Image: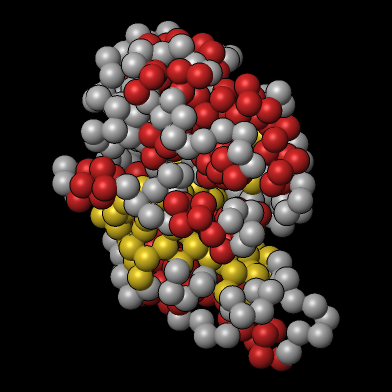
């Protein structure tokens, strides 16, 4: 279906080359880069159609990036299609920045791992050293990283506001019943990463944002990446959603064809999600970050291994009751480590990365282990299937041979 749409639906498409090669790049490298960004562009064009069909619309905006050829510095290409201001039509461009949501957790996980490397904390420390929380003496930093703490997700609590501080969110989560006893199961909870952000500040005396900027964003040259504090920095795009499930709106029940597309310009969770989801970035920066995290020298070998080993609890959970929900087209989410999702893609094998959804936006990124390819996507349409979309992109990139 996707390949058929690529051939028959020539949507207007803008593409961007972001090549890491030098002026001495070979003709083969240039040809490979051209083929890569062309394939990304074609896939995005098709995904804008298939990804919006159940809502009776075309996906407002999609962007993607890929890095291939691990033996060299990498051939980097990006493509984008759609609008920066849905439901209007100003086109996406080179540095269009998206709210990425939960891939923010990968930055927080890397920060905690570095603090462990430096001996400033231990992954086996009980959080009672820094946080007053029920059963805190039996909850470790490692459990927070791997979502095995049993601490409930603050998203389920009543009384949240867009201006909630990390302390507020932790207090709200205390009003909820623990999901399970520490270490006995797996359940994704944003509260875990809010607590990790607080712990990092207490350990270092620096804000979480300062640490993310000085340890990762600045040294890696992620110039289109920043932490959202309520105001856009650079060309940050609007999000979008359908007119459903809000106040005085009908429930979202696709397939839908008569709902209005609404702009999202001030997301409820953009700021409050903090260490669990407040970063804004581009697909190219996101791909460079994930490649550096999984295959670079941000962490030592021991900690990279921890990031690419799923917990038994997550494997059991994702292969059990959640299996039908986490199999999207060619991609399956089959495990979670101490900060990364394990994805399995048909014909391409296993990769490590993280997906996200936040008001008006979705994102996803993966570092494939066999091919060495890194692939990322972002969308300013809250209902786009970020798992299925990434699976199609990974397979498309896999067809390009450097």
| Quarter assignment of residue 332 | bottom left
For image coordinates 26% across by 48% down, the residue present is 312
Report the front residue among 331 and 289.
Answer: 289
Location of residue 159 in the rendering, given as x and y in whole percent from the top left corner: 42, 8
Location of residue 86 in the rendering, given as x and y in whole percent from the top left corner: 57, 41
Q: In what quadrant of the picture does the N terminus appear?
A: bottom left
For image coordinates 73% across by 32% down, the residue present is 210
Location of residue 192 in the rendering, given as x and y in whole percent from the top left corner: 44, 28
The vertical placement of 278 against 342, above or below, is above
Q: Is residue 205 left or right of residue 274?
A: right
Q: In what quadrant of the picture does the C terminus appear?
A: bottom right
Q: Is residue 222 left or right of residue 251?
A: right
For image coordinates 47% across by 76% down, the residue present is 371
Q: Residue furthest bottom?
A: 27
Question: Does residue 198 appear anywhere in the picture?
Answer: yes
The vertical placement of 135 against 37, above or below, is above
Location of residue 290 in the rendering, given as x and y in whole percent from the top left corner: 56, 56
């Amino acid at each position: 279906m996707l390949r058929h749409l690529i051939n028959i639906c020539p949507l207007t498409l803008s593409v961007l080359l972001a090549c890491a090669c030098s002026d001495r790049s070979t003709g083969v490298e240039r040809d490979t880069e051209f083929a890569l960004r062309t394939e990304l562009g074609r896939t995005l064009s098709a995904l804008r159609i298939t990804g919006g069909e159940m809502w009776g619309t075309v996906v407002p905006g999609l962007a993607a990036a890929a890095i291939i050829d691990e033996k060299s510095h990498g051939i980097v290409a990006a493509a984008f299609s759609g609008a920066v201001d849905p439901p209007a039509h100003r086109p996406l461009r080179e540095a269009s920045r998206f709210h990425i949501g939960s891939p923010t957790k990968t930055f927080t996980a890397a920060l905690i791992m570095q603090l462990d490397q430096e001996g400033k904390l231990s992954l086996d420390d009980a959080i009672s050293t820094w946080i007053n929380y029920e059963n805190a003496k039996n909850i470790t930093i490692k459990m927070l990283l791997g979502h095995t703490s049993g601490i409930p997700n603050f998203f389920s609590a009543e009384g949240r506001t867009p201006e909630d501080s990390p302390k507020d969110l932790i207090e709200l989560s205390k009003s909820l019943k623990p999901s399970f006893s520490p270490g006995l199961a797996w359940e994704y909870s944003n509260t875990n990463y809010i607590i990790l952000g607080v712990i990092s500040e207490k350990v270092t005396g620096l804000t979480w944002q300062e640490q993310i900027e000085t340890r990762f964003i600045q040294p890696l040259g992620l110039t289109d990446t920043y932490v959202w504090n309520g105001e856009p920095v650079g060309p940050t795009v609007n999000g979008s959603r359908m007119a459903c499930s809000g106040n005085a709106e009908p429930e979202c029940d696709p397939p839908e064809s008569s709902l209005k597309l609404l702009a999202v310009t001030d997301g409820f969770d953009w700021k409050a999600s903090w260490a669990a989801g407040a970063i804004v970035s581009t697909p190219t920066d996101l791909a460079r970050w994930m490649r550096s995290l999984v295959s670079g020298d941000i962490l030592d070998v021991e900690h990279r291994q921890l990031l690419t080993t799923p917990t038994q609890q997550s494997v059991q959970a994702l292969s059990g009751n959640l299996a039908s929900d986490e199999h999207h087209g060619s991609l399956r989410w089959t495990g979670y480590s101490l900060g990364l999702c394990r994805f399995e893609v048909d014909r391409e094998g296993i990769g490590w990365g993280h997906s996200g959804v936040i008001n008006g936006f979705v994102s996803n990124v993966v570092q494939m282990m066999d091919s060495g390819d890194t692939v990322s996507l972002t969308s300013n349409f809250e209902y786009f299937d970020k798992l299925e979309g990434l699976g199609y992109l990974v397979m498309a990139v896999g067809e390009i041979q450097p």
